[in-house]
Image (cartoon, rainbow, N blue to C red):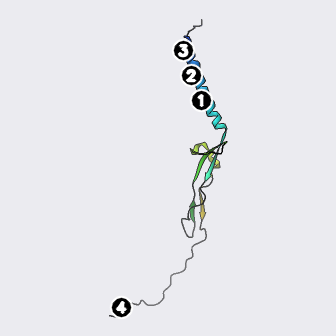
């Protein structure tokens, strides 16, 4: 046997209003999501190399942005962008070997004084 619960007209109107508002908010969210693109942006240049020779590292910044149809760009959480397509933030530099030479002696040790 089915049990029927009746609600007042006011309660039904409030339910419909809540559903309309919630649906409207959801549609606005989906519309905003669909009408924009997420992409990775990187800093203009690489940082200084950590070493002069023998292998060092350069770094740069990368962040996720969302661009709407009006080309307005907003910074968003990195989790919004595809992790596998994140640009490199480190690269090797100064890979040439450091020059070295065997130790050698110039001659006997001299003491330099002021002439006192």
How many discs mark residues in the rendered view? 4
Contact (Cβ within 8 Å) of mark 2 with mark 3: no
The residue identified by callout 1 is: 25
The residue identified by callout 4 is: 114
Residue 52 badge: none
Residue at x-position 58% and y-position 43%: 79
Residue at mark 1 to residue at mark 3: CA–CA distance: 21 Å
Residue at mark 2 to residue at mark 4: CA–CA distance: 95 Å
Residue 11 badge: 3
Contact (Cβ within 8 Å) of mark 2 with mark 4: no
Q: Residue furthest left?
A: 116
Identify which residue, 113 or 55, lies in the foreground: 113
Looking at the rendering, in which quadrant would you find the N terminus? Answer: top right
Who comes first in sequence, dot 4 or dot 3? Answer: 3
Residue 94: image location, x then y, percent = 59, 68
> SS class of the residue under badge 4?
loop
The residue identified by callout 2 is: 18
Who comes first in sequence, dot 1 or dot 2? Answer: 2
Query: Which quadrant holds residue 33?
Result: top right
Who comes first in sequence, dot 1 or dot 4? Answer: 1
Identify which residue, 86 or 102, lies in the foreground: 86
Who comes first in sequence, dot 1 or dot 3? Answer: 3
Residue at x-position 44% and y-position 90%: 108
Residue 16: image location, x then y, percent = 59, 19
Residue at mark 1 to residue at mark 4: CA–CA distance: 87 Å
> SS class of the residue under badge 1?
helix
């Amino acid at each position: 046997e089915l049990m029927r619960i009746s609600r007042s007209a006011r309660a039904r109107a409030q339910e419909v209003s809540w559903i309309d508002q919630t649906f409207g908010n959801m549609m606005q969210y989906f519309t905003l999501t669909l009408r924009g693109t997420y992409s990775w942006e990187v800093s203009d240049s690489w940082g200084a190399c950590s070493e002069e020779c023998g292998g060092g590292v350069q770094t740069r910044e990368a962040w996720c942005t969302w661009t709407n149809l009006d080309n307005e760009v907003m910074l968003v959480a990195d989790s919004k962008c595809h992790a596998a397509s994140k640009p490199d933030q480190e690269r090797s530099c100064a890979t040439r070997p450091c020059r070295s030479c065997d130790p050698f002696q110039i001659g006997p040790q001299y003491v330099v004084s002021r002439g006192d």
